[in-house]
Amino acid sequence: MRQVFLEKGAVVVKDVCKPMLDDYSVLVSVHYSFISSGTELATIQHSKQNPLFSNVPQKIKKVLESVAQNGVEGTKALIKGRLKGSLQTLGYSCSGQVIAVGKKVKHFCEGDYVACAGAGLANHADIVCVPELLTVKLRDKKFLKSASLTTVGAIALQGIRRAQLQLGETVCVIGLGLLGQITVQLAKLAGCRVIGVDLVSDRIKLARRLGATVALNATHDDVRKEVEFLTGHHGVDATIITAASQSDSIVQQAMEVTRKKGKVILVGDVGLNLQRSPFYKKEIDFLISCSYGPGRYDSRYEQQAQDYPYAYVRWTENRNMQAFVNLIQDNTLDVKSLIAHEASLQDIEQAYSMLKCGKGLGVVLNYKSEKDLESASEPEKESVSFQSSFAKASEDRPAKHDTIRVGFVGAGGFAKVKLMPIVSKLKNVKIDAVVDSDIANATNSGRVYAAAKALTDDRDLFKEDLVDAVVIASPHAFHSTQIINALRNGKAVFCEKPMVTDFNQLHRVVDFVKKNPQSRLCVDFNRSFAPYIQKIKKAVEKRSTPLVVQYRMNAGYIPGEHWVQTDVGAGRIIGEACHIFDLFAFLTDAKPVCVSAESLHAKQEDIFASDNFTVQIRFDDGSICSLLYTAVGHTGLGKERMELFFDGKSVVMNDYKELTGFGLPKSFNKKTNSPDKGHATILKQFFASLQDKNTKLPISFERLQSVSEISLIVDELVAQGGGEKEI
């Protein structure tokens, strides 16, 4: 399919793969998408500025911070990505027909005509994948063209709602671009007198035609004086700023024309270097209008369809979208006057050039004449169902080629700054494909390593035998399914922890591996491959007493809305503490027999038990290992510290920077300014095992299974406030 991108300041159309459908979204064959003269032109203009030569001191600071956090190689990878240039998606408002629905979508079915919203979602593309609550139905396909403006309309409508206008009030709208023209009409519908202000004569004339009582040209009209006489020297009841300018004078002008105890609502993007005097003297309320309305930027609302109760949040972003669509369908709004031109994707450069020259407020892109909707609407089917996959034996083919071709599934921050730089430097290993739900991100990440393919669905890696091994670095909840998909297709798998996020997933992976023992799977439990840990392991190998180990992880706070804390991330016990459970298994070289846990009981809702707990694990050799995990400490203390006791000896490992032995030779002690947690070593050993099948995998599957089980048990114990369980 075709999609519009911004690349090095130029608008380009590229052939890319279809977006992958998730459970809470709909797949839409786009009929129309809308190019606005404001937001998108500003994005293009900003992209032409060379980011490397602006604000140099701040750039240097960011580089140093990145080196401290991600290391030299990770920082080099980020800089390399910037230098190579990157694709950026364009578009945020479109309309079309639903061609597929996610498993948990409730209110749409195939064939529905819809309007869609969302930057990075409702793109200029043949097919888009949009969450259910960023999609609204249309009564008839005849409204599709007008409904392609729904996103902009919802933004304007939210500005009106923030103003809380009352019948008979006087409203000033500063900025008569696309947003301003819709705002003028909405304020008029609310029963208000409307004063419009702009610098462009054509926009001023259009505002008068669309309902403005008075429209002023700020270039030669004395706006303040005109408003004084129009309002009996009181000022307007509310001023809505829909302009786009970095000037601070617009806000000051708004304060001047607004009455005492009036309101100023900011919808557009303007300078905010405010002067105190007008605020103070007039006691004006300054309000920000957040995009489409309540729900915007709330991942639980937008990505997981957790709607707000109708009675308590009457106007969410979805309900604003639907209200705007209803106004269009009832012929209450004039949106046709806002569309300067209709173009096809072949004329995309001309469309943007027209807006850049000031010819109109927006352009509609028409997709219908350029594609066969019948073929585009066929959703891809998985050739083998998930359940039947366990019955089908996999064929092990990881070392088929001289150079191992690697496909990355997930191109998030950790993959880009840690895993990809390491894999790219391994001998006879080549990153050949990158999969990510964001096709622009997949393409940009792949460019850094000259990957041949950028995809949105991991299953596409196997249809044409594109890779020999898969590195999975996607959100945690998807790991188990992606592991089985890859193993079933004969690929070796290196999975960023965790392997699974619940017991059902664990049972499926274990069942598959038992039936396919040749499967080559490793999980990134890297701590046990760190040089300091390897040195400790050598020291305890010939011990005569059990180990006593105390590990402290001062993890730092992560808010509840972060993906790690959701079902997708599965929390920090399953997602991070698993590292330490594997470390305990490695050091003791024994099997766990009993687990006990206690969690913090805080009154505050923002302090989570799963972030603050203690765990003690007893192993069958008599060893006792405990983990203190907390998110309420100060990060200046350092993140990780381990104390270990055996045979009258003690070891202290501090943040992988310092290793000190007591009762051990002085040569045991080490210090470094470049902590190594074992990422490179485990990856090197994993790929070595693929090149030589006589080489064992870095971690046995039995250990992977045991560590996963411990993590899930601890998660359950902590969730119930603490407890003990024998294994």
Image (spheres, rainbow, N blue to C red):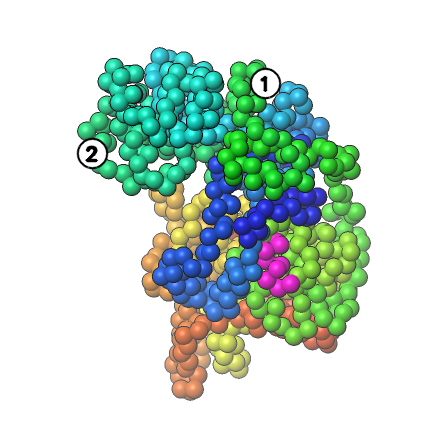
Identify which residue is drawn at 69% across, 48% down. Answer: 15
Q: Which corner quadrant of the image does residue 526 belong to?
A: bottom right
Q: In screen coordinates, is 273 left or right of 568? A: left
Query: Which image quarter is the N terminus in?
Result: top right
Q: Which residue is mark 1?
A: 329
Above or below residue 647? Residue 636 is: above
Q: Of marks 2 and 1, which one's residue comes earlier in the chain?
A: 2
Q: Which residue is mark 2?
A: 277
What's drawn in magenta, residue-wise? 442-450
Q: Residues within 10 Å of mark 1 (few under 14, many from 20)?
A: some
Verify CB contact (< 8 Å) between mark 2 and mark 1.
no
Identify which residue is drawn at 52% across, 80% down. Answer: 538
Magenta segment, principal secondary structure?
helix
Q: Amino acid at mark 2?
A: Ser
Element carrying mark 1: helix
Q: Which mark is residue 456?
A: none
Q: Residues within 10 Å of mark 2 (few under 14, many from 20)?
A: few
Say which of 16 and 398 sits in front: 16
Q: Which corner quadrant of the image does residue 665 belong to?
A: bottom left
